[in-house]
Image: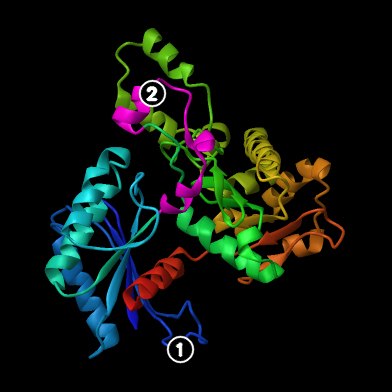
Amino acid sequence: MLILVVNCGSSSIKYQVREMADDPAGDAGGTVVTKGLIENIGTSEIEDHTQALDILAERIEAELGDRRIDAAGHRVVHGGERFSHPVLVDNEIIRAVERLSPLAPLHNPAHALGLRAIQTKWPHMPQVCVFDTAFHRSMPEHAWRYALPNEMYKEYGVRRYGFHGTSHDFVTGLAAEYLGRDRESFNAIVAHLGNGASVTAIKDGKSYDTSMGFTPLAGLIMGTRTGDFDPSIITAMLRRDPDMTAQQLDDMMNKESGLKAIAGHSDMREVDNAAAAGDGGAQLALEMAAYRLAKYIGGYHVAVGGAEALIFTAGIGENAHTFRKMVVDRLGALGIKLDPEANELRSGEVRPISTPDSALDVLVVPTDEERAIAEATAELIKG
């Protein structure tokens, strides 16, 4: 079975074709046949997503020859309160994705355009939506509810949704399998650390709490995002400068803050190099980010009644051994001990980086959201 995995942005389409094993005993994740990126959608170069899909089809046909795609799996950022699992796509599902656009105005409209473009290009091809928020639908109300007037939730849907759910779900399963634990009773903490970063408390194999909230801005210090901060700062700034617009504030919090604001760089590799060269701002940025993450880990250890494992994943989590050490060094009260040599090892495999006598297993688990989407799509199509 050939699965096309699609991630539609407002001006780009990232895609991957995976060949999924028909034999359940085979490689469930399949193999990558081809992948690519189409950019500049909405310009004179590529008019719209329909035209972009024509380009994608030409590329795929050149790679696959006579073989045909069996189904398409889409990453959709926001599923709101409606979607807790992947779903087969029909017109009503596409309209539902569009209706959720106020919760993800930069993402869901583009996802809907991609769904419709494939529907037009390949009208008989099954499509599946896999939602970034779905994994977090298992959070209890006391974790997702904000202490705001009730109409904020009822009228505007203001609550904690959480993101990176596909990744958190995927690496939780891999970690439980690696450690020989039954997922249904597995308690852990997953730190998905990239330019966007979030940490999730896993209780009995499910999301119990997560650092991102109503939007992906909340929680950890990220490449260009603030993470948690006092919201009264916004009202204070508006009183001081009434001409400041909502868009300016949004851009400041999402595009000009985080590591970039403190270190002058949003890329962790540049920040790490600058800190090693003695840059005080870069060192402060790393200390702030590590401290914030360590606080969440400590809190989530309590939230799940005692975690069995701490899992690092995504670009920074998998590759930035210096930052991992900065975080774990703050967790001595939890009895966590890091193996320095194991921590510095680079590998594409699941690997432990804690000592045998560490109170919690510390793992690096490479994430693969495209694989997770392909697996979910194949399972739903076969079902």
The residue under the point 65% across, 59% down is 185
- From mark 1 to mark 2, how far is it between C-alphas? 50 Å
Residue 148 part of the magenta-drawn span: yes
Q: Give residue 132's position: percent from left, percent from top.
A: 41, 53
Horizontal side of 303 relative to 34 (left or right) equals: right
The residue under the point 77% across, 43% down is 331
Residue designated by label 1: 23
Whether label 1 touches label 2, CB < 8 Å:
no
Horizontal side of 158 relative to 355 (left or right) equals: left
Which badge, 1 or 2, is on the more N-terminal residue?
A: 1
Q: Is residue 264 visible?
A: no
Q: Quadrant of residue 252?
A: top left
Residue designated by label 2: 150
The residue under the point 46% across, 58% down is 166
Q: Give residue 210's position: percent from left, percent from top.
A: 54, 43
The magenta-colored residue range is: 132-157
Horizontal side of 132 relative to 69 (left or right) equals: right
Secondary structure under tag 1 reads loop
Type of amino acid at the residue the image marks with label 1: Asp
